[in-house]
Image (spheres, helix red, strand yellow):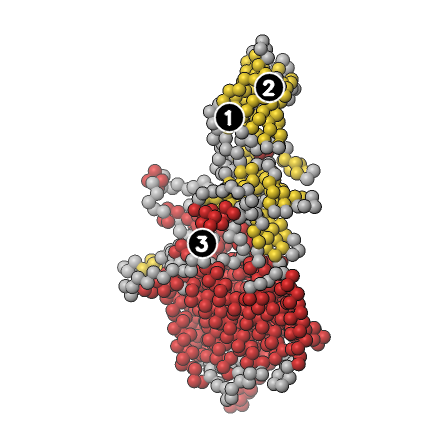
């Protein structure tokens, strides 16, 4: 009963949060419509504020209840059973909170709530209209997890995270046998998501989603109150913050993909990736139009459009991701929980309100009295924002193909449009040219912004242009850059770094607080160079020079045997040449919790269908003993790490551990790369094909070989020699007692220049014979000493054969990828500096406005007192 009470309390908090958000919205709307100096305005503002506080408390209550259910493993609840398990570490149990739709909506609600509280504390005079929009959005989001059905019309509103397993899966036969059945364990988090980046990436991304609501709210408030340009100053720092956080979240996701997936990169132009990237690009364009809106009416109007569009695109991405409309077009999309209609209403409501208000107020917005000069800074910044918008439109137009098909279905038309077969090539074909222009504009625009150049005064650009051509010429020659688009992108990016670097030096000499723009542009340019070389000039180094076909499967023979040519096969413990490296597959290892190194799988015996294993020997790594023989240890049972030793021409050795994950939820076996990070490149290695590391070997029928000492005999493709049979006092796994006799055979097996020793054991105890076979994985042999004939001196061996262990591996060099990560870091620093500076500007302006408002109130009271 106590367990059930937690869910009921959580659902009650959901209802309270929904209702209080509606009341808060009503209070703030009345406040915004009231006279500026009236007591009625203060009353309604306080009403809205108090109910938003109540809403915030209820949201926290919902979160606490859901976390309580997950952390305490209440598996009678569908959410806990579906997304968590007892074996998961605490960090991943926490991240299972946002694994499903309901939890991710709740995460979004949580960030909106925190940002709403921040706005109440900081916006002052803008609180009423801005928080009215915020509270409305919160009400809509709360409705997504409301989980109620309106009787009579059977209309479902939202999906509750507090649904019982019995309610979610009512047709299971177990309920008939035991109505109170509670699973002992849950399904757990998808193993692919059990990664530290998945603990921080979704919260960061959703904070970016939430922050995009702030410029939208200020834009609507500006139109609503006819404060057509005043909203820009308080909205700009929040727009910068939204771009910073959303960009960081996207890049975290890219790095997770690079570390965890095996498509060979960090960005795959997946539809879900695109639907988060497009709003970010629009936010960046919005920042630029906001900056020049004070002197350009067209930029002001564009700022309205883009501020509104950025948030609507977030809603559109939510609809595409969660409505099931993408189907199999994306690995990231959620299944439809029956909320697609509700999501559509949510998106259309704010779209209609925003567009209607824009159209209604459009004529009241200021217009430019004269055309903008092409030598003005406003012109060049506006052109840059325009190019960014065109870039985002191209991505959105292609990504929305599944939506076009669905619209066609609604009108009885089967359009059957398909996404591009090679999405990476399709998007790159367009985006490359857009960003050549963007890179050039970031350099030229900065010189116009700081008035270093103008009409008839372009000399300041000569030095950066000359430096650019010198650096790019050398780089193009040394780096063998031959494709024209790549040459242009590299030259444009170098120009952006050189020109912004020159501007940055001058700024730092004056006021470093103004350096945000130049630093951001340098970071973006370095990212472009890193993307260009790591993607355009990545090199497969695992070329198959054996002349043998690895696999006849379609995935390997497609594109003129591409994968057969670009993979190497490694046999267990047998060195193979790969380009300049000599490779040896040494072992399969597993991850033991509490140990920073991987442990050989042969040291452990896994308990079936459990996350625990028994140590078969002392676990000693790097001179430290972590566990003793017989100890029970906790492992990650889905993950297996292949120990691949690399030896370069200089004799330097390093080891990579590409991972193979047994993941039925993702189609079986999933490979993740092992990375070797050098200053100028990464070596990206992953397993394309391997034997199932959890499967037991399938042994052939026993073959008997009777030989004498020093005899040579043949074991399949191998030559074997019985060198000796000697007495032994130790048999692994078999403790010997007094009176026991044990001998071991020493068999030398020759395999193409390599020599192995196999030593099966023969034991006599109390006139009983025992046999201890020895298995050699590298040879795929198991040899047992069956009989010893003392009269003839002959020895009989039982031999079984199995498939030799192998892996098929691909290795790719990714040059200059570190420029991408360094550029990301610099980009975020630039955004951070700009955010702080613009926020301080807003605070100064706000305080003056508040002071003026207070003076008006005092003056009004004096007048009223004088009248009295």
- Front-most of 726 and 332? 726
Examine the rendered structure and indicate whether residue 240 appears above or below residue 78. Answer: below
How far apart are the alpha carbons under marks 2 and 3? 59 Å
Q: How far apart are marks 1 and 3 (CA)?
A: 43 Å
Q: Are marks 1 and 3 in contact (CB under 8 Å)?
A: no
Disc marking residue 800: 1
In this view, 767 is above or below 658 = above
Earlier-in-chain disc, 1 versus 3: 3
Q: How crowded is mark 1: few (under 14 residues within 10 Å), some or many (20 or more)?
A: some
Q: Name the residue under label 2.
A: 711
- Residue at the image position 59 percent from the left and 19 percent from the top: 711
Residue ID for mark 3: 331
Residue 364 placement (x, y as % from top left): 45, 85
Q: Give the residue drawn at x 57%, y 33%.
A: 778
Q: Are marks 1 and 2 in contact (CB under 8 Å)?
A: no
Q: Where is residue 215 in the image (x, y as percent from the top left)?
A: 50, 72
Find residue 281 and report its horizontal and vertical position in percent: 51, 68
Q: Are marks 2 and 3 in contact (CB under 8 Å)?
A: no
Label 3: state its secondary structure.
loop
Q: Where is residue 393 in the image (x, y as percent from the top left)?
A: 45, 69
> For this view, does 345 lie left or right of residue 577?
left
Distance, label 1 to label 2, CA atoms, is 19 Å
């Amino acid at each position: 009963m106590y367990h059930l009470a937690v869910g009921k309390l959580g659902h009650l908090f959901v209802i309270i949060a929904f209702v209080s958000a509606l009341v808060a919205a009503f209070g703030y709307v009345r406040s915004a419509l009231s006279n500026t100096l009236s007591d009625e305005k203060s009353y309604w503002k306080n009403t809205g504020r108090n109910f938003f506080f109540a809403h915030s408390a209820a949201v926290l209550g919902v979160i606490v209840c859901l976390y309580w259910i997950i952390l305490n493993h209440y598996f009678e609840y569908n959410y806990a059973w579906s997304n968590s398990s007892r074996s998961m570490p605490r960090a991943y149990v926490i991240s299972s909170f946002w694994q499903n739709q309901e939890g991710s909506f709740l995460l979004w609600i949580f960030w909106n709530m925190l940002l709403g509280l921040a706005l109440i504390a900081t916006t002052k005079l803008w609180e009423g209209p801005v928080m009215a929009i915020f509270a409305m959005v919160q009400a809509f989001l709360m409705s997504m997890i409301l989980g109620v059905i309106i009787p009579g019309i059977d209309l479902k509103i939202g999906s509750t995270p507090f649904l019982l397993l019995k309610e979610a899966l009512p047709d299971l036969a177990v309920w008939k046998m035991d109505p109170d059945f509670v699973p002992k364990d849950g399904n757990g988090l998808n193993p692919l998501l059990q990664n530290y980046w998945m603990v921080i990436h979704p919260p960061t991304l959703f904070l970016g989603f939430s922050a995009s609501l702030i410029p939208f709210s200020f834009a609507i408030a500006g139109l609503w109150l006819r404060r057509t340009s005043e909203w820009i100053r308080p909205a700009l720092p929040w727009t910068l913050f939204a771009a910073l956080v959303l960009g960081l979240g996207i890049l975290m996701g890219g790095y997770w993909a690079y570390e965890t997936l095996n498509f060979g990169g960090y960005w795959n132009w997946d539809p879900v990736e695109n639907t988060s990237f497009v709003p970010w690009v629009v936010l960046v364009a919005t920042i630029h139009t906001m900056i020049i809106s004070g002197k350009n009416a067209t930029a002001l109007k564009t700022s309205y459009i883009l501020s509104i569009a950025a948030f609507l695109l977030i809603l559109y991405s939510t609809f595409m991701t969660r409505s099931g409309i993408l189907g199999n077009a994306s690995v990231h999309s959620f299944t439809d929980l029956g909320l697609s209609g509700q999501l559509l209403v949510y998106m259309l409501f704010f779209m209609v309100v925003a567009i209607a208000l824009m159209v209604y107020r459009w004529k009241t917005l200021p217009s430019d009295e004269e055309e903008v000069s092409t030598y003005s800074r406003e012109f060049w910044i506006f052109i840059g924002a325009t190019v960014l918008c065109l870039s985002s439109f191209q991505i959105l137009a292609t990504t929305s193909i599944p939506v076009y098909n669905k619209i066609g279905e609604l009108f009885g038309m089967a359009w059957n449009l398909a996404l591009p077969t090679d999405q990476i090539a399709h998007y790159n074909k367009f985006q490359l040219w857009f960003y050549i222009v963007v890179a050039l504009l970031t350099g030229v625009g900065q010189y116009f912004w700081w008035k270093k150049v103008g009409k008839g005064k372009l000399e300041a650009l000569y030095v950066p242009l000359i430096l650019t051509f010198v650096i790019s010429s050398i780089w193009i020659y040394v780096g063998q850059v031959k494709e024209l688009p790549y040459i242009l992108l590299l030259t444009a990016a170098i120009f952006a770094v050189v020109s912004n670097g020159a501007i940055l030096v001058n700024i730092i000499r004056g006021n470093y607080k103004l350096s945000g723009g130049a630093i951001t542009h340098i970071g973006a340019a370095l990212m472009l160079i890193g993307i260009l070389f790591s993607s355009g000039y990545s090199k497969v180094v695992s070329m198959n020079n054996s002349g043998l076909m690895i696999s006849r499967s379609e995935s390997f023979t497609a594109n003129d045997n591409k994968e057969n040519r670009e993979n190497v096969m490694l046999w267990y413990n047998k060195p193979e040449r790969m380009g300049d490296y000599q490779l040896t597959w040494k072992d399969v290892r597993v991850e033991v919790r509490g140990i920073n190194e991987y442990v050989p799988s042969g040291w452990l015996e896994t308990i079936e269908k459990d996350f625990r294993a028994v140590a078969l020997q002392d676990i000693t790594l790097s001179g430290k003993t972590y566990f003793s023989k017989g100890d029970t240890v906790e492992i990650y049972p889905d993950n297996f790490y292949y120990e691949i030793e690399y030896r370069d021409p200089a004799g330097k050795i390093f080891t990579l551990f590409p991972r193979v994950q047994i993941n039925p939820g993702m189609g079986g076996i999933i490979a993740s790369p092992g990375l070797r990070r050098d200053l100028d490149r990464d070596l990206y290695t992953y397993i394309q094909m391997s034997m199932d590391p959890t499967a037991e070997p399938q042994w052939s029928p026993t073959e008997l070989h009777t030989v004498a000492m020093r005899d040579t005999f043949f074991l399949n493709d191998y030559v074997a020699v019985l060198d000796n049979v000697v007495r032994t006092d130790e048999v692994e796994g078999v403790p010997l007692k007094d009176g026991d006799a044990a001998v071991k055979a020493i068999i030398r097996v020759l395999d193409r220049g390599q020599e192995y020793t196999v030593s099966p054991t023969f034991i006599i105890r109390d006139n009983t014979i025992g046999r201890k076979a020895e298995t050699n994985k590298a040879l795929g042999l198991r040899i047992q000493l069956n009989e010893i004939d003392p009269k003839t001196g002959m020895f009989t061996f039982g031999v079984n054969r199995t498939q030799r262990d192998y892996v098929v591996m691909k290795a790719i060099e990714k040059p200059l990828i570190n420029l991408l990560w360094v550029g990301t870091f610099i980009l975020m620093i630039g955004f951070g500096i700009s955010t702080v500076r613009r926020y301080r500007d807003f605070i100064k302006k706000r305080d003056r406005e508040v002071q003026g408002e207070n003076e008006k109130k005092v003056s009004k009271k004096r007048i009223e007192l004088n009248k009295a």
